[in-house]
Amino acid sequence: MKRITWHFALCGALLSNSAPTIAAAAAAFIMETAPPAGFEELTEPTPLVVDVYYGGRLIDRNQRALVSPTTLKFEQPTALLDKLPKTIAREKLLGRLSQTLPTNSHLVCRSNQRVRCGVVEAAVLDVIYDADRFRVDIFIGADYLPTRQVLDDPYLPPASNQFALSQRLSGSWSGSRSEPESDSRDSQSASLFGESILSFGESSLQGRWSVSDTSEPATQITDLYWTRDYRGKAFSVGLLQPRGSNSRFINSGPLYGVEYYQSNNTRVDGDLRTGTPLEVYLPVRGRVEVYRDDRLIHSQLIEAGNQLVSTRSFPQGAYQVKVKAFAEDGRPLEEFEQFFAKDSLLPAPGEWQWNLMLGTPAERVDNSSSIPDAQSNYLLQAGLGRRLLDNLGLFASTTLGEGSQALELGGRWITPNIDISPSLIGTSDGRSGRRLTVSLKSSWATLLLQESYLDSVDEASVEDALLERGYHNRSAALNVPLGKGRLSARYSMRDAGQEINNSQLQLADIAVGNDPLRTIEYQYPFARAKSWNGDLRLSYNDSGDEQLFSLNVQFRYNDGPWNHGASLRTDSGVDEERREFAGFSSSWTDGDLWASDVQQQVYGETDGDALSLRSNTRVAGRRGYFASALNYLDRNNKTLSYVGSFSTTLATDGDHFTWGGEQSYGSGVLVGINGADEDQFEILINGQRRGYATGGEQTLISVPAFDTYEIAVRPLGQGFYDFQDNSETVTLYPGNIASTSYDVKSLVLVVGRITENGKPVTGARFKLAGQETVTDQFGLFQLEYYTAPQRLNFSYINWNHCQVPVVEQSSDRDWLNLGTIELSQAKCDRDEIARN
């Protein structure tokens, strides 16, 4: 203790003795920050003209400001504020712009290696002034900028067509024929279905009817209503099938009434609005990268400000994402993590999902009437849905009938590893039901559990009740990756009968009745190659008294338009002898061979005692599609079964009429090819082939309603054409028929070669049928004519007041070859040439 005290005393004495010296030195070295005498003007504000930038973009080239080495003040802050993007609290920003602002010149990026530069964290508004370039960059605080949406307008634009009439026709037939001595009876049936739509832009009058030889009466009308679905709201009135209900228990069926509901049909942000909003603030224009499990799932260039990141390409599910923001030059700006949930079954964040319905059930009680009768009771239904959290949504609906009322509650909760969707219902007459779906996901297994239950009542009560007959179904499915293969276990219990199905072999299907069905299966891909592969399946099925062991080997081979397959299977039960099956399949598609789309499939299988042969044919062309299937079964007796269907559409927009369509949808595009008679052209819808058109005719391309399409044409053949290769954009609602046309001229390519004494002539200028051309370095020339090759017949060419004979020529549909033209054979009698 004494030693420590002595040291402190010594230090104090030394400091006291040197204090005058230190004070004198400090007085001699006082730092001066003021300018030297006579240079005061260099630090005073100077009027300058500066370039003003926001978000890296020039917004004002001639803004006057008072600038000093450390401060800057704009002379016209109001005019400058008008050139900035839309902001919040404009008066506060104007007040900040009117103040003398620090220049923050130390933050100017003077080297590409510098990281923390070019950006200032502004509470309200700040600037960075670059004195070398007379440039001012403005930065606005995130709280003073509105969030910019990914899409300026989330709804479809108005319809491109304001009047159209379309009639869709489809038919189906079915039947079978057996040997005369068999116990089976021959049967056949056929039906014709129609959908008539009279559209007026976004509104339409729709009707559906059918004619069948197995129903009474033969002609029936099932729907007849007026509807309008526009900008997220749909309204319908008439004889209709409700579309907006979110009830999982009540199926109201057709009714005479009115329906009004929130509709997603006219939304163009469907892939965006189902996910959690992902917002990022960028002080300057730059780039955003989004990672999931350290894997890049999205990148996007973004302007400065508060921006919503497009989540259109994000996978479905709930997971953590990492967001990284960079400036244009690659400097990192921000990095953060956020929980993200995207699910199409959840309501959109911040929006209500709702529906209203009122009407009376429609039921056909008199077989002499083609239109159903209105019942005496009424039905009123209302529903709401809302996303409460990013990954949690609740649903509620109530249904009021004349004899009973029902209340239904449901929800959906999703996490990275579990999804749960429960629903409950209760009625005023004491009935109740439940539905539950649970999905468990992990890197090593997935498990799906489902149950649906509705208590039973007697038959008389069901006729007047809101709910159908009771049921109780359960199922579970477990999938576990095991090596290169997959192990799966399934359990199902249903009130209705079920069977063990085989996707490759029809003869191997086994009905097991109402008993619970338990299945364990292992699938192993034992061979994988470029053109062929093979799979092995081992399975065990147990249902009541039925136990079945199966071994299935399948081979598939792909060879251009051909696809072949073969299956071998053996089954053995506990008390049954072993059964063996063999089958083959082949399919062929025409590809680009024909303009129409043609597919043919054949199947064959046998188990030693029975033989089955099947054929499926489908042809889709500009006039519609046709499909047919034949099945020959030789088991105890011989039976031939057949089914078929067709579809086409008759349509007009008031100016043009046509019929056809490779596919059957509720709207379409009329494409007219003016010229190039009988030539064929592909119709590209959003870059994809959707049909073909014929020159000189109108062609109908059927496409789904509620979408915007970009239409273009492309020649199918090898010919040459002259036309405006422009695309046209149309927006279609139900029943709309938009029309577009292309003026196309067929071109004939005329080629040849000019020589003199056998050597090619370069730069030879001559005329041919009114056109002038020049040969290249090889003596070759090329001309184009708007006519058929057969109409072109050249006996000579005009060259330097001479006529050079064309000795031989050959032609095809799209070209004419004049061969080699020898100048040494030219006739140069000018008087004779003048007379000719």
Image: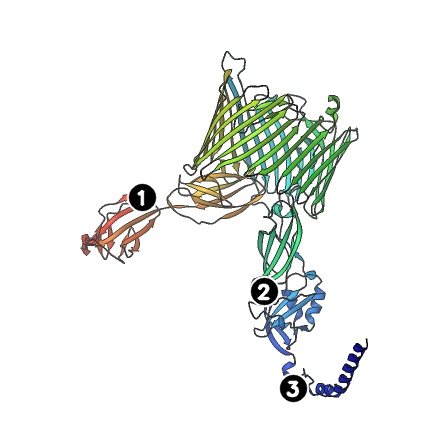
Q: Using a 10 Å C-alpha cutoff, classify the residue at mark 1 as few (fewer than 14 neighbours), some (14 to 19) or many (20 or more).
A: many
Q: Which residue is mark 1?
A: 789
Neighbour tally class for label 3: few under 14, some 14-19, many 20 plus, Cα within 10 Å? few
The three-letter amino acid code for the residue at tag 3 is Pro
Q: Which dot marks residue 36?
A: 3
Q: Quadrant of residue 77?
A: bottom right
Snapshot quadrant of residue 74: bottom right
Q: In this rendered view, identify the residue nearer to me: 566 or 642.
A: 566
Colouring: rainbow
- Local secondary structure at mark 2: loop
Single out the mark in the foreground, 2 or 1. 2
How far separated are the C-alphas under marks 2 and 1? Answer: 59 Å
- Image location (x, y in percent) of residue 546: 62, 22
Disc marking residue 56: 2
User: Is label 3 or label 1 in front?
Assistant: 3
| Residue 240 screen position, x and y as percent | 66, 33
Can residue 786 be seen here? The reply is: yes
| Lower sequence index among marks 3 and 2 | 3
**Residue at mark 3 to residue at mark 1: CA–CA distance:** 92 Å
Residue 726 image point, x, y percent: 47, 49
Vertical comparison of 265 with 39: above or below = above
Amino acid type, mark 2: Gly
Q: Are marks 3 and 2 in contact (CB under 8 Å)?
A: no
Position of 801 relative to 217 (above/below)? below
